[in-house]
Amino acid sequence: MCGIVGLFLKDEGLSPRLGAMLTEMLVTMTDRGPDSAGIAIYGNEVPGEAKITLQAADPAAFETLGAALDTALGIEVIVQVKDTHAVVHLPQAHVGPARRWLRENRGDLRILSTGQAIEIYKEVGLPADVAARFDLAGLSGSHGIGHTRMATESAVTTSGAHPFSTGADQCLVHNGSLSNHNALRRRLAGDGVAVGSQNDSEVAAAYLTRRMQQGRSLGGALEDGLNDLDGFFTFVVGTRDGFGVVRDPIACKPAVMAETDQYVAFGSEYRALVDLPGIDAARIWEPEPATVYFWRH
């Protein structure tokens, strides 16, 4: 049992409140998963710039990172540190070289996400505590998704926390469990797609990334997953310009959605949505089984 939330803003005027609204929604879901929590947030793009979100066991690991990357890449980067996470801002053309340098030289740092819009913050602990550590309520953006975890198939660690990002500006949160994730993990490895944790949800994220690398749209990849992913799942996925929802054909994991002229919202339970503005006038429904929903800017 885990808790998922998602919020896609139609009204740009709500952008400064995105982090606060998502945080409140996620904290409401605390009793569905007290082990770890995280949020992926999209927004604040700068033309030609990309962002790499990193995590370290000790924030001191970031002290010399900026200077080292400047020297290695021959450019000037900006490193913004938030507790055990850091967001590296750099020219988009240098993302590949930066990732390679980090893998080869900084094994103490974990790459959580890369892209033009995405930032991910996640750690072990209750949602309220994780939110306070990273000041999630102060974040602005266009859309975001969050997760609070009750661990089942893998250890309670930061690497096992959601969201999972396996492609540029892509991420996934998951409530449920997959029975064929080990076979999929081996297949993905054969295709050159690495899965860093033992979590079955990261396998699902990597599966979608691989299908999109093969030319499928996100909607098409989610439809493929209905045939290729065995088990129970509700997925909420984020992309640079939108977010999507899909439930398995049995749909035993709870889910509710709300839509107004200002936003589209997702929660594992309705109580996650009750404090959103205008919720009393929202169209509210339960997503159908084996049906892909997607909204984009």
Image: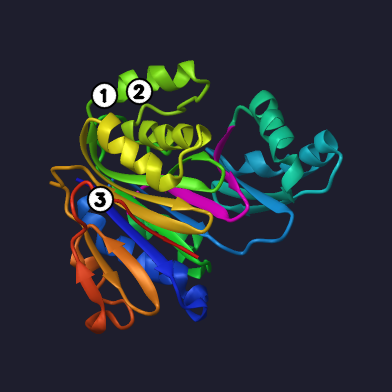
Q: Nearer the viewer, residue 34 or 92?
A: 92
The quadrant holding residue 180 is top left
Q: Considering the numbered disc 3 on the image, is that residue within a helix, a strand or a loop?
A: loop
Q: CA distance from mark 3 to mark 2?
A: 22 Å
Which of label 3 and label 2 is nearer to you?
3
- Within-10-Å neighbours for mark 1: few <14, some 14–19, many 20+: some
* Magenta highlight on residue 276: no
Question: What kind of residue is marked 2?
Answer: Leu
Q: Nearer the viewer, residue 144 or 242?
A: 242
Q: Pinpoint residue 130: horizontal percent, then vertical percent.
A: 41, 55
- Where does label 3 land, which residue? 291
Q: Are marks 1 and 2 in contact (CB under 8 Å)?
A: yes
Percent of width and height locating residue 222 = 35, 42
Mark 1 secondary-structure assignment: loop
Which image quarter is the N terminus in?
Answer: top left
Q: Earlier in the sequence, mark 3 or mark 2?
A: 2
Residue that label 2 marks = 184
Residue at (59%, 30%) from the top-left corner? 108
Q: Amino acid at mark 3?
A: Thr
- Residue 146 % position (x, y): 37, 55
The magenta-colored residue range is: 109-126
Q: Is residue 280 above or below residue 78?
A: below
Q: Which residue is mark 1?
A: 180
Q: Amino acid at mark 1?
A: Asn
On screen, residue 284 versus residue 57, left or right, reads left
Q: Residues within 10 Å of mark 2 (few under 14, many from 20)?
A: some
Please state the total of marks drawn on the protein image: 3
